[in-house]
Image (spheres, rainbow, N blue to C red):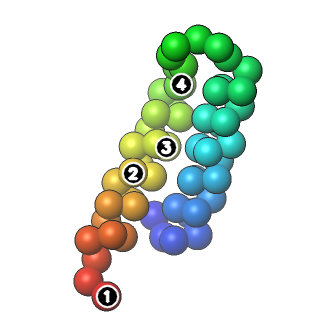
Amino acid sequence: MDEAMIRDAARALADRLKALLDESMADEIRLTRDEALLAQGFAESVAELMTRPA
């Protein structure tokens, strides 16, 4: 993933999580498999960017 894709994925994931949290008073929320894969890929990409030498 390049930086633009990471940024877009982060925004999409944040929007989805906000919607789930806003519409639900449940103690837990569930993600689809695609959403979970997006979250995993995003987290891995952020970790990769954070450990990349300057």
* Secondary structure under the numbered disc 4 in the rendered image: loop
Q: Indicate left or right for 15 with 3 as reference.
A: right
Q: Residue 3 appears at what percent x and percent y?
A: 51, 71
Please identify the quadrant where the N terminus is shown. bottom left
Q: Residues within 10 Å of mark 4 (few under 14, many from 20)?
A: few
Q: Which residue is mark 3?
A: 38
| Residue assigned mark 2 | 43
Residue depicted at 57% across the width and 53% down the height: 9
Where is residue 49 shown, x and y percent of the image? Answer: 36, 70
Q: Please state which of the two labelled residues, at mark 1 or mark 3, is closer to the viewer.
A: 1
Q: Which mark is residue 32?
A: 4
Give above or below for 48 relative to 40: below
Q: In the figure, is residue 2 to the left or right of 18? A: left
* Amino acid on which the number 2 mark rests in the picture: Ala
- Badge 1 marks a residue whose secondary structure is loop
**Residue 49 horizontal side relative to residue 32, left or right:** left
Q: Residue furthest top?
A: 26
CA–CA distance between discs 4 and 1?
35 Å
Q: Nearer the viewer, mark 2 or mark 4?
A: 2
Q: Earlier in the sequence, mark 2 or mark 4?
A: 4
- Mark 2 secondary-structure assignment: helix
Which residue is rendered at x = 67% and y = 16% of the image?
24
Please tell me how crowded label 1 is: few (under 14), some (14-19), or many (20+) other residues with Cα within 10 Å. Answer: few
**Labels 1 and 2: the sequence-earlier one:** 2
The numbered dot on residue 54 is 1
Q: Percent position (x, y) of residue 10?
A: 57, 53
Secondary structure at badge 3 equals helix
Disc 4 residue type?
Thr
